[in-house]
Image (cartoon, rainbow, N blue to C red):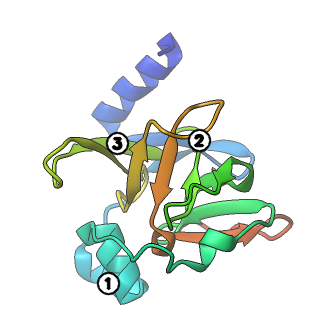
Amino acid sequence: MTRRRLLTRIAQLFTGVALMPYAKSSLALTVLKKNKSDWRALLSGQSYAVLFEEATERPGSSPLNGEKRAGTFICAACYLPLFNSAQKFESGTGWPSFFDVLPDAIGKNRDFKLILPRTEYHCARCGGHQGHVFEDGPKPTGLRYCNNGVALQFVPAGSKLPELRT
């Protein structure tokens, strides 16, 4: 961890502000806090269940599994960009998978729901559950970010990213 990143993390702890890239520039973004009824009103039932109740969608059910166009995958709740399409790969698991994330786009927690520890990751802005990261991905990272498709939206290259939800 670089000194700059360490100081940024310390500042985030004390201010609640996350410094994350959005589009092509870095903006200071406040961590988004909404109550569950606000999120429920904005999302489909399945997206809400995955993002804010940590459910899992059925493998093979997401249309994003077959998405091969250039573009950006964003959080379905707050619209923060999480992945570039160049980071996507076919893992054979039935869920959209990525070998890397956009800088400062996610947070991680240990998850013991299946008894053995796993690493859960979530949107750094709204806290919405995205999936789990495993160490069986391709080079260059060796990581597989296994994402629930209903927790994402795809924005094709050349299209304007939606404004972040407030």
Examine the rendering and report whether any part of residue 31 can be seen: no
Image quarter of residue 70: bottom right
Residue 106 vertical position relative to residue 140 in the rendered view, above or below:
below
Which of label 2 and label 1 is nearer to you?
Answer: 2
**Measuring 39% from the left and 57% from the top, which residue is drawn there?**
131
Answer with mark 2 or mark 3, whichever residue precedes in sequence. Answer: 2
**Measuring 71% from the left and 43% from the top, which residue is drawn there?**
25
- Between the residue at mark 2 and the residue at mark 1, the CA separation in whole angstroms equals 29 Å
Q: Secondary structure at mark 1?
A: helix
Residue 35 vertical position relative to residue 102 in the rendered view, above or below:
below
Contact, mark 2 vs mark 3 (Cβ under 8 Å): no
- Between the residue at mark 3 and the residue at mark 1, the CA separation in whole angstroms equals 23 Å
- Between the residue at mark 2 and the residue at mark 3, the CA separation in whole angstroms equals 14 Å
Q: Judge from the rendering whether residue 98 lies leftward or rightward of residue 148; answer left or right.
A: right
Contact, mark 2 vs mark 1 (Cβ under 8 Å): no
Q: Secondary structure at mark 2?
A: loop
Q: Which residue is the extreme one toward the front?
A: 92
Image quarter of residue 119: top left
The kind of residue on which mark 1 rests is Arg
| Residue 85 spot, x, y in % from top left | 72, 56
**Circle 2 residues within 10 Å: few <14, some 14–19, many ≥20:** many
Examine the rendering and report whether any part of residue 151 can be seen: yes
Q: Residue 153 versus residue 165: which sits nearer the camera?
A: 153
Q: Secondary structure at mark 3?
A: strand
Q: Which residue is the extreme one toward the top?
A: 3
The kind of residue on which mark 3 rests is Lys
Where is mark 1, residue-wise?
40
Answer with mark 2 or mark 1, whichever residue precedes in sequence. Answer: 1
Where is mark 2, residue-wise?
100
Q: Judge from the rendering whether residue 102 lies leftward or rightward of residue 111; answer left or right.
A: right
